[in-house]
Image (cartoon, grey):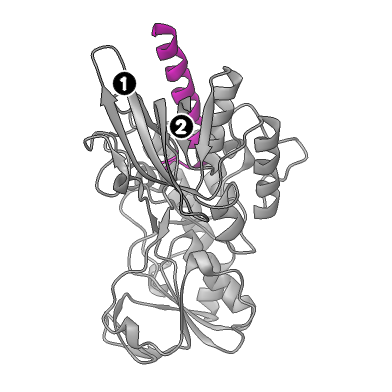
Amino acid sequence: MMKEVVIVGAGPAGLAVAACLNSFSIPNIIFEKEDCIASLWKKKAYDRLKLHLAKDFCSLPLMPHSKTTPTFIPKDQFIQYLDHYAKHFMINPVFCTEVESARCAMDERSHNWFIMTRNKITGEAHEHMSNFLVVATGENSEGIIPEVAGLESFAGEVMHSSEYKSGAGFEGKRVLVVGSGNSGMEIAYDLSNFGAMTSISIRSPVHVMTKEMIYLGMVLVKYLPVKLVDVLLVILARLKYGDLSKYGIVRPKNGPLSNKISTGKSAVIDVGTVHKIKTGEIKVVKGLLSIRGNEVVFTDDKSYHFDAIVFATGYKSTANTWLKDGGYLLNEEGLPKHGFPKHWKGMDGVYCAGLARRGLDGVSMDAQNIANDIKEQIKCF
């Protein structure tokens, strides 16, 4: 059976696109490989997680957060919002269905997308047709654990941050967190709170801000140049935290907003980790060099013994492995080949939503742009 639009992925991006299309009465279907919507939030997020940006920047199209919603939304409350969103817009994904390939066939008058799916439970394969295809599988399709010499010899527990829930069970253990983004810093804080002897490997420069600073920056950037707002944010961070370089935390040369625009890397929202680093409750170590049993060797040639390692080393998109569009839309990393704001549209009716590293606010913009474009193209048929 042919649908006007096939959407791949039932995370926030896929839901947002479906809601916008439904508002225009454009038939669509979502294929989701997991057994629920928003599986990353429901299955792969640690317990204490809150949205790092204010609710003003974290709503999906056509449904702003209520006045009673906290400014910084806890994970479970955001999941409730997504469940309500899907119900309200009558979004019913086809679950446990993985897309294996999507290719376009064209003639002089039109193009059709042929999408091969496989049911993960029964193993049955099906081919579907659509006029339009939306890639909404997200930036975080698959966790990344870097290659480290000797990692296979480590005798303790090794996990990716997507498997981490809380520090319960790590009390008294020597735990190394690898990665100093928001997940790594918050997981280190959580482990320390549960009594783990925690170290964090910080290899790259990183901005550390409070959530209020970032909120201020995102409001001011609507009215002031990015560079000027960056200067203000760096001054505020220095007043708040002082010189963190003596603790092993070095700021990037670019300001926090400029760095996000150019590299996609967000500033770290401090939840109390910096205080624990300053007091010595959390130890900062250099980048990993190699592992010998329970001994981890770092790039400054120092070595320490650990009982567990948590890799908070990010994710990767896998959409480029199944999308067969001639490589126009996505690069080798599965992210948009074209820069913002032209990243969301490919050729022959293919689009991507939520892959531009611009958070939930970017998801909302992508969804509205895609739905509006499809609406206009349908008018021309």
380 within the magenta span? yes
* Res 6 label: 2
Any part of residue 322 in sight: yes
Residue at point 29%, 77% (across, down): 148
Crowd around label 1: few <14 · some 14–19 · many ≥20 (10 Å): some
Question: Is 269 left or right of 350, judged from the image as shown?
Answer: right
26 within the magenta span? no
Q: Position of residue 182 (x, y in %)?
A: 49, 59
User: What are the residue bounds of the magenta stretch?
Assistant: 354-381
Q: How many marks?
A: 2
Quadrant housing residue 336: top left
* Residue designated by label 1: 111
Q: CA distance from mark 2 to mark 1?
A: 14 Å
- Circle 1 SS class: strand
Q: Amino acid at mark 2?
A: Val
Q: Position of residue 108 (x, y in %)?
A: 23, 13
- Circle 2 SS class: strand
